[in-house]
Image (cartoon, rainbow, N blue to C red):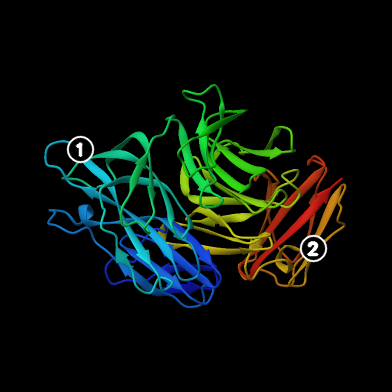
Amino acid sequence: MLLYDSQSNTIYPDTEHYPYFDVYNLDINANKILVGTNNYLYLSEDNGKNWKRSLYFKVPGYHPFDYYRWAYFTELKFLSVNEAIAVAWAYRETYMGPDEVYSYIFHTVDGGNHWQLCADTTLPACFSLSFPSQDRVYFFGKYGLIIIKKDFYPNNAIQTYGKARFFLSEDQGNSWIELPLPFDTMANMEFLNRTEGYIFGGGGTTPSAGFYKTQDGGLTWNFTPLGLPMINKGQLINAHLMYFLTADSSQVYRALYDGYQWDTLKVFTCPAGKFIRDIGFTNENTGYVICLEQYNIETSWIYFTEDAGQTWTLIGNFPYLNSLKATYNQNGYAYGMLGRIMQLEKGYPVGTAPALYSTDVGNSQVFPNPATNYLNIQIPSKSRDGMTQIVIYNMAGQRVFETHKTGNQFLIPMTMLTPGWYLIIITNTEGTWHHKVLKR
């Protein structure tokens, strides 16, 4: 089962085998949530309140190390509340040369309570999966090799992936037809329906990055260049709206079709010392960006916009989160290492918004707001150890001011800050308070 930590708003797997599974993927349909980890699928049928193991799978056959029998559930896709497809990465060990990475396919018709292993297990490593209709499953993968020092810890590995391949199944993953791809520079794919799909990429053999579109189920593709750098991930909102993360993980672009042409706009630039790990948008105006520290990937910074990227709010830094799943409006999930999952609602972690980030949080106050020269802060409780930390971040996530004070009333100078929005975090042994303040 999955345990829920109300203080950190996270859930994590508790198993007798290995209690620190990473979460590789997550998908949602109605009140059901599927989570993919190492060897396990977990299922909640009540919006995450209670969890159970949905599937346990280890690669069959004898291997000298458990590592080679692990499966990584990297792709999950609901078609309906009852039907879903899951893909697990596995390693086929070879004693002469690199190991091969390939995929196992699973199918459920009862909402994830029981799974059937599909007959064909010879597909390459899956990088993207789409399940738009009962008779259509699309699979985008690459032939992968991994070189592991077999006498040492498995993370000491070199991975390389070959040319992309594209497959279609018309029987829920039991058999597959490989379709030709007239290009080789791509990141991921998404389908709007059973025949209309998009593959994001370019910037290699094509003049600039953009997207490939098919309207006949992948038999033919047309390329639309957008003049962007190489793409690491594309997110499709609808046929007229897309978002792109660049391959160097430093910028996010929006592409909008006005009926005549595609217009692109940079909506987010990564703060110094960080890189963008994932994006999650729900419409033209609202979305999340998650960044990791360059030299500390265990710390993530999550940003939120509700005005089409004109301004971004840093909602906080959180441990072990590295992926995003946007659902609708301003809601979604952040998840990652050590089984961590955090639910987001209206731009903030569930249980904290909007009150926690208002200008009067738990009887703490900041005034005046907007501020010009000084900011007064009052908190309800003095620290037991006598010291309170006050940190100010700008909207790029950069720490611009920090001080430590005693008492429960503080006067903070604001003259050194440029006009704009700032996040103030006050922490002591009695609690933590957050405020969003405008400096004029």
The residue beneath circle 1 is 98
**In-front residue for pair 206/150:** 206
Image spot of residue 58 (x, y percent): 24, 61
Residue 102 in sight from this viewpoint: yes
Residue 268 in sight from this viewpoint: no
Q: Quadrant of residue 74?
A: bottom left
Q: Is residue 407 above or below residue 422?
A: below
Q: Quadrant of residue 178?
A: top left
Q: Which quarter shows the C terminus?
A: top right
Q: Which quarter shows the N terminus?
A: bottom left
Q: How many marks?
A: 2
**In-front residue for pair 254/273:** 254
Which amino acid type is marked by label 2?
Thr
Is 45 placed left or right of 380 in the picture?
A: left
Q: Residue at x 86, y 51 (%)?
A: 371
Q: Residues within 10 Å of mark 2 (few under 14, many from 20)?
A: some
Which amino acid type is marked by label 1?
Pro
The residue beneath circle 2 is 359
Is 33 placed left or right of 329 in the picture?
A: left
Image spot of residue 124 (x, y percent): 30, 44
Image spot of residue 255 (x, y percent): 66, 38
Q: Secondary structure at mark 1?
A: loop
Q: Secondary structure at mark 2?
A: loop
Q: Is residue 13 above or below residue 118?
A: below
**In-front residue for pair 385/440:** 440
